[in-house]
Image (spheres, helix red, strand yellow):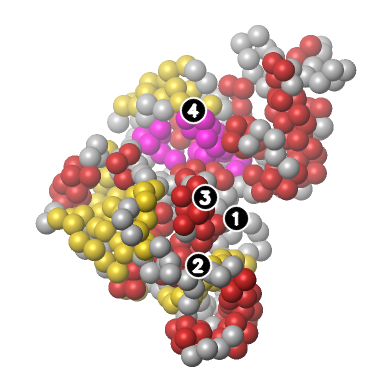
Amino acid sequence: MKVAIGVNGRQVEAEVEDRLLLVHFVREVAGLTATNIGCDTTSCGACTVLLDGESVKSCTVLAAQADGCEVTTCEGLTGSDGRWHAVQRGFHAEHGVQCGFCTPGMIMAAVSLLAENPDPTEAQVRAGLEGNICRCTGYHNIVRAVLAAARDGRLPGGGSPAGAADPAEEPA
Amino acid sequence: MIPAPFTYRRARTVEEAVDLAAEAGDEGKFLAGGHSLLPLMKLRFAVPEVLIDIGRLAELSYIRDEDGHIAVGALTRHHDLEHSALLAAELPLLARAAGAVGDPQVRHRGTIGGSLVHADAASDLPAVGLALDATLVARGPSGSREIAMTDFFRGLFETALEPGELLTEIRIRRPAERGWSFQKFTKRAIDWAIVGVAVQGGRVALVNMDSVPARAGGVERALAAGDGPAAAAAHAAEGTSPVSDINASAAYREHLARVLTARALAEAASRN
């Protein structure tokens, strides 16, 4: 069937198999590979993307179901000026990363969590990330990263806290 | 993993969904949120030739305060049940249990109707529907009919729905007895319950204690006879036949059912 899916603000139209999964559409049709395939069984959360603003596991959604919808992947968080999203800055500042495989899914789950609850407690962050597994078991820094992003996002204009390094301004 | 090939059809109205199902016959399946069906299709345990996507039927997504009962549209997502102010006030058991299904991503897609018609005894909402003594409304080619929750589950993953019938609404009377509790024991937060218990007043239903979602008749009779929570809970495993699997032996599940039922009855009593 023919589908038209907005991916990070770009309209992607393609003739696809009816059975194509959204994660394969994102990776192979839209060509965006931040979204990882981990367990492929709705368990690990590595493939989490936003579908019309809410976190979903894209291994368990058909591309056909997303036809006409807006998908946001980790690549879509960075602003057109190259500035990172508050959650990306939080993961950088708190080192919410070990091997990095779960990171894009963790970040998208965190973006969805903070959209629903901008001021979560630590317990609410942990509950909100229940659907994402880190095989390195690096959860403490991931939780700190999301709490830092929440503080960051509450500042006027969603800017970085005073004195905190903005990675987008650092040399690569 | 990818599903076997199928033809995708998208219904724009309930009538069209029923028509498409009639056209597809035995080879058709309704697709709601897809969080029970798509995993089965990826494992090739389910191989429908036609998928009828009802996911966009906004007319089936609602939670309404009707005369004497709460009406929940079959396509209402777990996320919406979890955050409903009406359910928090009137049917907190349903709101609480929906918030314990899977994880946030699953709750953004999965629906109450999908969970009920999937009829997995290890799922939470079938037991909740039983504890709430819900009435189901189904639409088929010859019109709508009501099915009592107690008549709905017929066998392993089998319900009273006829081929081509679509579950459209769940009706729940305001409970006369307000005490409620939902207990769920898992190893990881996102897992299916090893055992779970849903209590509303004197009605008690168990998760994952049999091949079919079922009420705990022994416990309900003991409560009706005046037994307290601890004495009534001792009957929790009566008449059940839980499986032994990688998570727990049958004997362990029977023990868990008694422990969780005691906790649930005590909590429900504290909320009366």
Q: Determine the residue positioned at 42% across, 75% down.
A: B214
Q: CA distance from mark 1 to mark 4?
A: 24 Å
Residue designated by label 1: B190
Disc 1 is attached to a residue of which chain?
Answer: B
Amino acid at circle 1: Ile
Q: Quadrant of the C terminus of chain A?
A: top right
Q: Is residue B250 magenta?
A: no
Q: CA distance from mark 1 to mark 2?
A: 28 Å
Residue designated by label 2: B178
Q: CA distance from mark 1 to mark 3?
A: 16 Å
Amino acid at circle 4: Val
Q: Does mark 3 fall on the same chain as mark 1?
A: yes
**Element marked by disc 1:** loop
Q: Does mark 4 fall on the same chain as mark 1?
A: no
Residue designated by label 3: B82
Counting residues from the start of the chain, the first of labels 3 and 2 encountered is 3
Amino acid at circle 2: Arg
Residue designated by label 4: A71
Amino acid at circle 3: Glu
Q: Does mark 2 fall on the same chain as mark 3?
A: yes
Q: Is residue B245 above or below residue B140?
A: below
Q: CA distance from mark 4 to mark 3?
A: 24 Å
Disc 2 is attached to a residue of which chain?
Answer: B
Please rate how many residues cluster around mark 1, counting C-alpha atoms within 10 Å: few if below 14, some from 14 to 19, many from 20: some
Please identify the residue farthest to the left as the structure is shown.
B142
Where does residue A158 sit, x and y in percent of width and height?
Answer: 70, 19
**Mark 3 and mark 2 residues within 8 Å of each other at the beta carbon:** no
Disc 4 is attached to a residue of which chain?
Answer: A
On the question of residue A41 being in view, the answer is no
The magenta segment: A45-66
